[in-house]
């Protein structure tokens, strides 16, 4: 079974109503990135940060996977699908994908600010965190999100996955955020690359088939291509 590695970004979840940094009127427009997505912002105003992510979870709880997510999950019947996502939502998992690596953390998890950084799952009934919510060791809980300026712990695992790819697919990412954007450099030269995005995206490499559509339509087109050449 051929290994298909998928790199997804914000455009993957846009059709599901998950707001991105660039959305007009979205959550991000109401806050400066440095206030809600950096270690300095957390130290400066943890209550603001916690409330911001509470709002994002509230939004996620009403979102559902779109056709792009479900088509990806269906491909597991015929391909060894490995998803590397820059998204912090759980829509890939909701759609049924079983191998998902989150580069930038997960919205429905929190972690301790203790040195051991234990991670805890949240539920749809108990998804809010507040100042004073602590782990069993007595340390404040923070969002399990990789903020700007923080290391990306899963990047080495992601590189190993990409190096094994027989097919590499990029969906809904501008390829401007590093280190995620550098993953394409680890694709073997003979491996076909497919890029799905309604916008023009520069990847700086050859052997790329561009499908200039949104995630749902783009994945349907990719599916046709894959099964015609399988």
Image (cartoon, grey):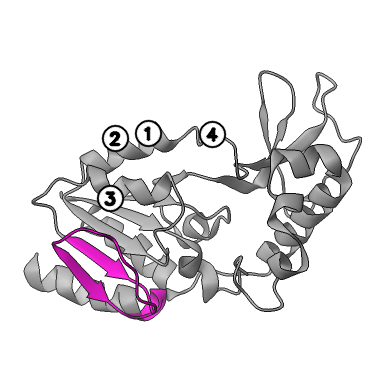
Badge 1 element:
helix
Query: What is the distance, in whole Å, between disc 1 and disc 4 at their CAs?
Result: 13 Å
Q: Quick check: is 197 in the magenta stretch?
A: yes
Compared to residue 89, the image places residue 172 above or below, namely: below
Q: Position of residue 142 (x, y in %)?
A: 75, 38
Disc marking residue 160: 2
Query: What is the distance, in whole Å, between disc 2 and disc 4 at their CAs?
Result: 17 Å
Q: Residue at x 36, y 39 (%)?
A: 158
Q: Earlier in the sequence, mark 3 or mark 4?
A: 4
- Left or right: where 106 falls relative to 154: right
Q: Quick check: is 203 in the magenta stretch?
A: yes
Q: Are marks 1 and 2 in contact (CB under 8 Å)?
A: yes
Few, some or many C-alpha atoms within 10 Å of disc 1 (few <14, some 14-19, many ≥20)?
few
Residue at far right of view: 132
Query: What is the distance, in whole Å, between disc 3 and disc 1 at their CAs?
Result: 14 Å
Q: Which residue is mark 3?
A: 184
Q: Position of residue 169 (x, y in %)?
A: 28, 60
Q: Position of residue 43 (x, y in %)?
A: 81, 37
Badge 4 element:
loop
**Magenta span:** 193-217
**Marks 2, 3: nearer the viewer:** 3
Few, some or many C-alpha atoms within 10 Å of disc 3 (few <14, some 14-19, many ≥20)?
many
Observer-nearest residue: 65 or 102? 102
Query: What is the distance, in whole Å, between disc 2 and disc 3 at their CAs?
Result: 12 Å
**Marks 2, 4: nearer the viewer:** 4
Q: Which residue is mark 1?
A: 157
Q: Earlier in the sequence, mark 3 or mark 1?
A: 1
Observer-nearest residue: 103 or 151? 151
Compared to residue 94, the image places residue 131 above or below, namely: above
Q: Which residue is mark 4?
A: 151
């Amino acid at each position: 079974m051929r290994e298909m590695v998928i790199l997804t970004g914000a455009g993957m979840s846009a059709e599901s109503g998950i707001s991105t940094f660039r959305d007009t009127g979205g959550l991000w427009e109401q806050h400066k990135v440095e206030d809600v997505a950096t270690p300095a912002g957390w130290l400066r105003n943890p209550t603001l940060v916690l409330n911001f992510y509470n709002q994002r979870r509230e939004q996620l709880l009403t979102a559902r996977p779109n056709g792009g997510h479900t088509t990806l999950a269906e491909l597991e019947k015929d391909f060894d699908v490995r998803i590397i996502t820059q998204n912090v939502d759980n829509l890939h998992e909701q759609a049924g994908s079983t191998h998902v690596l989150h580069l930038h953390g997960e919205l429905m998890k929190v972690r301790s600010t203790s040195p051991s950084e234990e991670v805890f799952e949240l539920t749809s009934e108990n998804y809010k965190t507040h100042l004073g919510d602590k782990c069993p060791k007595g340390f404040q809980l923070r969002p399990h999100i990789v903020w700007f300026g923080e290391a990306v712990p899963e990047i080495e695992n992601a590189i190993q996955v990409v190096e094994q790819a027989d097919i590499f697919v990029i969906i809904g990412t501008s390829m401007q955020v590093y280190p995620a954007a550098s993953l394409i450099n680890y694709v073997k030269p003979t491996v076909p690359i497919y890029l799905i995005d309604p916008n023009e995206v520069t990847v700086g490499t050859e052997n790329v088939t561009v499908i200039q559509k949104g995630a749902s339509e783009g994945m349907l087109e990719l599916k046709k291509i894959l099964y015609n050449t399988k």
